Amino acid sequence: MSVGRDAREDLFGEFAGYGSTETSMQPVYTVEAITHRDDPIWPLVAEGRPVDEFHTVTGVGQAAEVLAELRAAGLPVTTAWSPLRAASHWMVVTVRQDWRERLPGVGSAELTHRIGKVLSTSHPGRATAATFVLDDDIDPADDTDLLWALATRIHPLDRSEAWYGFVHPLLNCYTPEERARQSGPIVFHDGLLPAPGEGRLPHSSFAQAYPERIRRRLLDHWDD
């Protein structure tokens, strides 16, 4: 490595799936030898559009931290998941079906607020731009399940709360000014279903809309 000669670093791709637009002067390295190893394990990530190792390692790790923090706060959450194809920009938190019994007098907006209050001051909480709070009747790691739930349970305008403060400068959804300041909103979306008997609609699918005996008869004859 040269201690006296610098060169402009080339553009670099990041986990959001976009290349950087700014470079800087960095020390010049000169390769003098390359050694060889059979079946090498390369300790690197070619970052870019998902899914790559950043999303699987960092995203899963952040989700685990979020889950631990919410459970430590006594909130009735069942899981947290950073959808891999959302490039670490989203977090999904699911809550127990009996959360109303566990938190008497608390509505969905208040529960979402309490989740936001915990995560708005934590490192993993502020590392994603949007958190969606959903019932655990869906699997947030199943993209088909998740996309259906987000499309049908997240209000297009209301039922969300923004918490302002630090934002990750590499999250591409922010404005250039917000990324430069490293300050902006993270938003928590209340996607919880109404209480049973208060407007909640039943699932309409093969798994939920038909009696078990009918489903079994169909599956038993599926290949006939």
Image: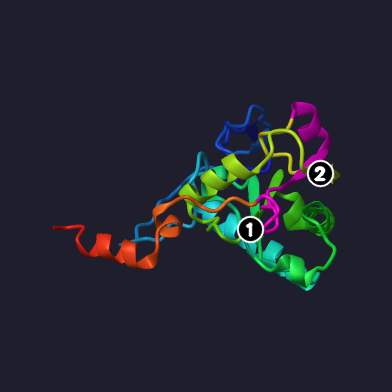
Asked if the residue under mark 1 is in contact with the one under mark 2, i.e. CB atoms within 8 Å, the reply is no
Q: Is residue 88 left or right of residue 181?
A: left
Q: Which amino acid type is marked by label 2?
A: Glu
Q: Residues within 10 Å of mark 2 (few under 14, many from 20)?
A: some
In the rendered image, residue 221, in percent from the top left (x then y), is placed at: 19, 61
Up the image or down, 82 lies above or below 211; here it is above
Residue appearing at x 26%, y 59% in the figure: 218
Position of 3 compared to 42: left or right?
Answer: right
Q: Residue at x 64, y 53 (%)?
A: 92
Q: What residue appears at the point 66 percent right and 42 percent down from the top-left corner?
A: 154
Residue lying furthest left in this view? 224
Viewer-proximal residue, 208 or 84? 208
Q: Is residue 73 above or below residue 33?
A: below
Instruction: Name the disc covering residue 135, or none.
Output: 1
Secondary structure beneath dot 2 equals: strand
Quadrant hosting residue 3: top right
Whether 24 is drawn above or below 163: the answer is above
User: Can residue 54 be seen from the camera position used here?
Assistant: no
Numbered mark located on residue 166 in the image? none
Res. 11 in view: yes
Q: Looking at the picture, how far across and down is residue 219, in whole percent?
A: 26, 62
Residue range (magenta): 175-199
- Residue 193 falls inside the magenta stretch: yes
Q: Which residue is mark 2?
A: 161
Q: Nearer the viewer, mark 2 or mark 1?
A: 1
Q: Amino acid at mark 1?
A: Asp
Whichever of labels 2 and 1 marks the residue nearer the N terminus, that label is 1
Quadrant for residue 67, please give it.
Answer: bottom right
Q: Nearer the viewer, residue 58 or 96?
A: 96
**Quadrant placement of the C terminus:** bottom left
